[in-house]
Image (cartoon, rainbow, N blue to C red):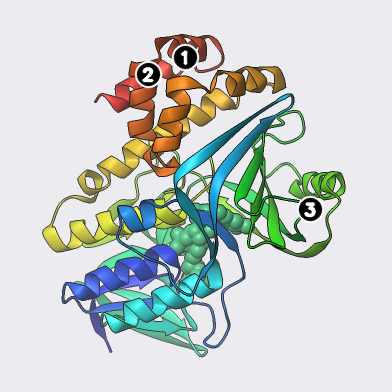
Amino acid sequence: MDRVDVLIVGASQAGLYAAERLAQQGLRVCVIDRRPDGVRPARRTLIVTTYLDERLGVVPKRSVLHQVDRMAVVSPNRKAVFDFRRSDWVLERALWIEELTERAREAGAEVVLGSRFLGIEHEDGKVRAVLQRDGSVERLQVDHLVGADGVFSRVARAAGLKRPPCVRIVQAEVRLPRGWDRWEARVWLEPEMCRHFVWLVPEDGRRGVIGVIEDLDRDPMAVVRTYVERLGVEVLGFQGAKVAMYHPSLRPWTRVQGLPVYLVGDAAGQVKVTTVGGTVTGLRGARALVRSIVEGVPYDKAVQDLDRELRIHWVIKRGLARMDGRAYDRLVERVHGRVREVLEQYTRDEMASAFKEILKGDLKFAAWALRHGFRHLPALGRVLWK
Ligand SMILES: Cc1cc2nc3c(=O)[nH]c(=O)nc-3n(C[C@H](O)[C@H](O)[C@H](O)COP(=O)(O)OP(=O)(O)OC[C@H]3O[C@@H](n4cnc5c(N)ncnc54)[C@H](O)[C@@H]3O)c2cc1C
């Protein structure tokens, strides 16, 4: 093979989903990944909203470990429990990537493992991707180049695009505390200990993960150890990696010598900064990419809805980052009535719709939020009603 319509670098969630949909449209698609053939992706427990099947039409099968019916949010002195309208999926990432690989291959995409993207070369008016496979260097002529190669995207670097900021996530795989409700996930908001938050997601009736997000200058392991001790649980293993964070200044597309280059998933910072969830948003980015390549819609237009959603999370996160434990207590206390109803009705992937309803339906809450850290609320309003 020396020419393809679309080369996708990164055979993970965003890249494989894009490949499947592009191949379904009859394009010649090749997805490469540096991970050697026969080596499984790292195990990782993901909690994902039903946006996945309800709005994207993707129904995970073998990779489903469990489903969770509610989320408890715990601040230093308060607790609120939200019942989901429909249960969240708990997925195992290695199996999920295997599932997506099969789907992409069945649709006609070529998935090549053990192939590393090195850069872009232009010669005689032709632009080629330079790849390394089995110790030798290959050149591939491409009409569209897609970077789905994660937070440290080499495609972004080769195309001169800015890479997203990132945080570190560690999840300890644990035996569930005795008597733990297996249908409930829990989030602890304790800003004096952890700038972001801590969670426990059950994988079944016996196991689960305790997860922590921290900025790069802090050690998430210290927080994990504290929670493991507090809950008195046995640790069975660890999962961890750096994950991208959305930033409004990111521009995930360009042209290099006439070659259109796009970024999707973590490479594009398509991650909700409130929860550091990048599965659904990465798939939404992949959908926008497909629309752009197949229908010729500019990528910035195709990602507009996703960008609005990600921007809402970014504004909310900036407000939350200002809050101390007492403010979190007040926030949790205020989640009742219409606010609770709305938060139970919409998923975490529909915060743009949810916040519109909350701001319209509960002016007292809006006024409180404005006083307590959400100085960006007017900006939020501008994004929502733009
Ligand atoms: C511990 C942990 C828990 C998480 N929990 C959740 C969760 O509960 N819910 C959720 O929604 N999200 C969660 N996330 C985030 C989510 O996993 C990521 O947002 C998502 O995996 C990003 O997918 P992606 O397809 O963009 O890229 P990635 O999964 O980062 O994959 C990039 C791929 O590109 C390949 N690659 C890189 N460079 C090259 C190169 N030069 N040549 C060829 N291939 C290359 C890599 O091998 C890799 O396979 C979690 C992350 C971590 C670390």
Instruction: Specify the quadrant of the image occupied by residue 158.
Output: bottom left
Q: Is residue 244 above or below residue 2?
A: above
State the residue position of label 3.
Answer: 177
In the rendered structure, which amino acid carries the disc numbered 3? Answer: Pro
Q: Picture coordinates of residue 279 (x, y %)? A: 45, 56
Disc 3 is placed on an element classified as loop
Question: Residue at 55% across / 16% down in the picture?
Answer: 373
Q: Which mark is residue 208?
A: none
State the residue position of label 2.
Answer: 359
The outermost residue toward the left is 295
Q: Picture coordinates of residue 208 (x, y %)? A: 69, 58
Q: Is residue 180 left or right of residue 233?
A: left
In the rendered structure, which amino acid carries the disc numbered 2? Answer: Leu
Within-10-Å neighbours for mark 2: few <14, some 14–19, many 20+: some
State the residue position of label 1.
Answer: 365
Disc 2 is placed on an element classified as helix
N-term mark: 1 or 3: 3
Q: Is residue 152 visible?
A: no
Quadrant occupied by the C terminus: top left
Quadrant occupied by the N terminus: bottom left
